[in-house]
């Protein structure tokens, strides 16, 4: 008579995936919480060249000013009077945020100055103006 070795039917063979699933979910939650979200302007502008432009780590909040004076933030057009309110709300949520104003080279300097004033009046003092760092000549 041949002897056969069988595992009892109540014993399961296999890999328990629950710990790996728990680890994966925890890792996903960690990355979602620690991700720094950048508010994009949502419009393409042609930045002016500047010989003395310095490369800085990009700001968290981007405000674009088009050549016709339109102000864009977070992929939508906003009015000048709304800039301070939006910046105050974002500054309360994350006080370490910085702002980069991306002004088109054909935009009015007056509009840029007004937007910069509104941002600073909202309490954000770290405001930069974007420029192309190439030595593209003067005008």
Image (cartoon, helix red, strand yellow):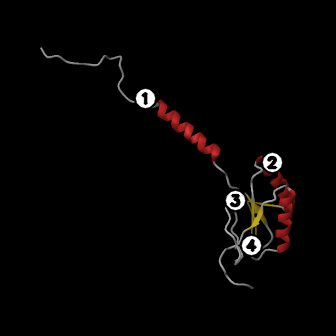
Residue 35's x, y, as percent?
63, 48
Which residue is tagged 1? 16
| Cα–Cα span, label 2 and label 1 | 45 Å
Q: Residue at x 86, y 63 (%)?
A: 117
In the rendering, which numbered label is found on residue 92? 2
Query: Is residue 117 positioned above or below 47 on the image?
Result: above
What residue is shown with label 4?
Answer: 104
Examine the image and state in which quarter residue 57 appears: bottom right
Which residue does the numbered mark 3 point to in the structure image? Answer: 40
What crowding class fits label 3: few (fewer than 14 Cα within 10 Å), some (14-19), or many (20 or more)? Answer: some
Report helix, strand or loop for mark 1: loop
Distance of label 4 from label 2 (alpha carbons)? 29 Å
Q: Nearer the viewer, mark 4 or mark 2?
A: 2
SS at mark 4?
loop
Q: Earlier in the sequence, mark 3 or mark 4?
A: 3
Q: Compare marks 1 and 3 and give the one earlier in the sequence.
A: 1
């Amino acid at each position: 008579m041949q002897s056969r070795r069988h595992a009892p039917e109540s014993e399961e063979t296999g890999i328990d995936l629950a710990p790996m699933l728990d680890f994966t979910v925890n890792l996903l939650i960690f990355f979602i919480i620690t991700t720094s979200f950048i508010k994009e302007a949502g419009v393409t502008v042609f930045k002016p060249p500047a010989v003395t432009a310095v490369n800085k780590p990009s700001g968290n909040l981007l405000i674009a000013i088009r050549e016709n004076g339109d102000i864009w933030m977070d992929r939508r057009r906003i009015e000048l009077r709304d800039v301070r309110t939006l910046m105050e709300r974002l500054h309360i949520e994350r006080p370490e945020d910085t702002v980069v104003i991306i002004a088109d080279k054909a935009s009015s300097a007056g509009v840029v100055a007004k937007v910069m004033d509104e941002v600073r009046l909202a309490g954000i003092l770290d405001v930069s103006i974007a420029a192309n760092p190439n030595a593209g000549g003067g005008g």
